[in-house]
Every structure is written in structure tokens, then in C-alpha cells.
């Protein structure tokens, strides 16, 4: 978050997360820990690649169907 504070965790703002999932975020006020978290994220970002509509278009048919089914069922899962 900045040089002296880091928050690590998850929080999804959807019905399933509010009612069913137990999600947590750890907040730490420590400069060294915050620096380690920043380094970790920078390393992850350096190894990542942007995914856009063309990447979805290149997926096999069964993965597209699975993705659409998961999106349809997400509110009740």
C-alpha cells in the first residue's frame, strides 16, 4: 500500500462472498514487510502478460462453454 503499511488478502464484493465465503485480509504496519510485498508483486507483474478479447477468442470451444457456464452459475455457487 505504501512504504510502511501493507494489506494482503482477498475480498470480493459479490453475494457469494458476503454470505458464504470466509475471506480475510491481513493488515501489517511494518516497513520491511511492506517492501517484501511490493517486491513480490513487482516480480509477479514482470512475469505476467495482458489478456484481452483476442486471448478469449483463441480458446477452444469447450473452455468458452465452461467459462460461460461458470459465469451463469456464479451467483448460486
Image (cartoon, rainbow, N blue to C red):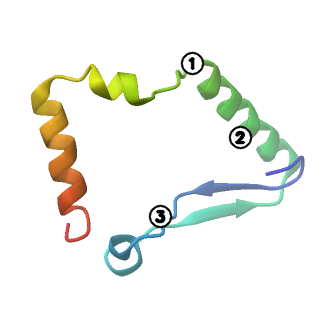
Q: CA distance from mark 1 to mark 2?
A: 16 Å
Dot 2: element: helix
Query: Residue 47 shows which numbered tag?
Result: 1
Nearest to the eye among marks 1 and 2: give it.
1
Q: Which residue is mark 3?
A: 12
Residue 23: percent from the left, percent from the top?
A: 46, 67
Q: Nearer the viewer, residue 35 or 65?
A: 65
Query: Residue 37 shows which numbered tag?
Result: 2
Q: Nearer the viewer, residue 62 or 22?
A: 62
N-terminal label among 3 and 1? 3
Residue 72: percent from the left, percent from the top?
A: 19, 59
Query: What crowding class fits label 2: few (fewer than 14 Cα within 10 Å), some (14-19), or many (20 or more)?
Result: some
N-terminal label among 1 and 2? 2
Position of 42 with respect to 9 (left or right) is right
Q: Name which quarter of the figure residue 20 lies in.
A: bottom left
Dot 1: element: loop
Amino acid at each position: 500500500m505504501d512504504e510502511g503499511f501493507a494489506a494482503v488478502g482477498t475480498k470480493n464484493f459479490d453475494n457469494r462472498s458476503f454470505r458464504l465465503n470466509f475471506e480475510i485480509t491481513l493488515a501489517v504496519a511494518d516497513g520491511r514487510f511492506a517492501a517484501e510485498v511490493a517486491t513480490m508483486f513487482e516480480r509477479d507483474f514482470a512475469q505476467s502478460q495482458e489478456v484481452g478479447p483476442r486471448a478469449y477468442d483463441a480458446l477452444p470451444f469447450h473452455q468458452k462453454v465452461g467459462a460461460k457456464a461458470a459465469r451463469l452459475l456464479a451467483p448460486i455457487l
